[in-house]
Amino acid sequence: MHLERILHAQGFGSRKNCRILIRHHAVTVNGEPCDNPFADFDTDKLAFTVNEEPWEYREKAYLMLNKPANYECSHKPQHHPSVFALLPHPLLERGVQCIGRLDEDTTGLILLSDDGQFIHRMSSPKWKVPKIYEVGAKHAVDADQIRQLQEGVQLVDEPAPIAALACEQISDQVLHLTLAEGKYHQVKRMLAAVGNRVESLKRIRIGELVLPDDLAEGQWRWLTESELASLNGAARA
């Protein structure tokens, strides 16, 4: 593939702008400078830099992000900064999207991609990909509340009771709640339905993918091949 097309595909602007970058000696490929926009390269495992920033060619983008509080999962935020402000510009140019949304005050694991089929598989209720939330409750949680959450609670505007796939008590006021759906304010509404209240909420797992301890709030990274395979497996289960 021509170098200008590679840069364009990876989100570095129009092909004209990519040609300008290359001709102005802003690009190296596999450690070597290249000022020819039409130089051909095999994209498999291709490593390059743009303005000394290292990149690796990826046909599709699959990312995880540790969402901080007071960020909105929207390209057009209304009250707080967008999570997309935490990503480098080329990823925005590629059109990466959040897979599902977390409320502005909810933190933790969120996936992003520019692969429409992957986004659909991971977000469609049909596939019931489990998600685990760490819930900090305002009041101590008792055995009856856990029973209700596991058996199902009736939420306003829902035709049938909704049950957690699992509910593990970590401490008096902390639960790990596993859900297969992503309804509006679902965790908060479920806790309210059993007479309690959510004080903090963090998503810590999607399928088999656990939020890494070394991924600080506000940081992102690419998914590994094994992580992506496990997510695709969860969406087919």
Image: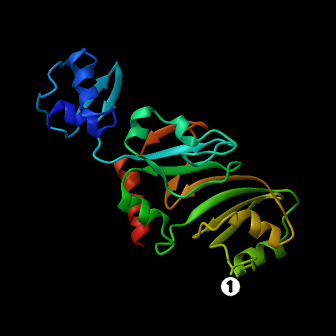
User: Where 53 sits versus 97, above or below?
Assistant: above
> What residue appears at the point 50 percent right and 62 percent down from the top-left corner?
207
Q: Residue furthest bottom?
A: 160
Q: Secondary structure at mark 1?
A: loop
78 over 5 or under it: above or below: below
Query: Depth check: 203 or 1 in front?
Result: 1
Q: Quadrant of the N terminus?
A: top left
Q: Measuring 84% from the left and 65% from the top, which residue is drawn there?
A: 141
Residue 142 shown left or right of residue 48 in the figure = right
Amino acid type for the residue under numbered disc 1: Ala
Q: Position of residue 2 (x, y in %)?
A: 14, 34
Is residue 57 something one can see in this rendering? no
Residue displayed at 61% across by 48% down: 108
Q: How is the image coloured?
A: rainbow
- Tell me what residue is drawn at x 57 percent, y 48 percent: 74
Question: On the image, which quarter does residue 153 sit in?
Answer: bottom right
Task: Looking at this view, name the residue that lies furthest to the top.
Answer: 24
Q: Is residue 85 left or right of residue 226?
A: right
Comparing 110 with 35, the one in front is 35
Q: Give the quarter of the image for residue 163.
A: bottom right
Q: Label 1, on which residue?
A: 160
Number of residue marks: 1
> In x, y percent, where is residue 219?
54, 36
Please, is residue 228 above or below residue 215 in the view?
A: below
The answer to whether one can see residue 134 in this image is yes
The percent position of residue 62, horizontal first and vertical second, equals: 40, 48
User: Counting other residues with Cα less than 10 Å from the Cα at mark 1, is it few (<14), some (14-19), or many (20 or more)?
Assistant: few
Which quadrant of the rendered structure holds the C terminus?
bottom left
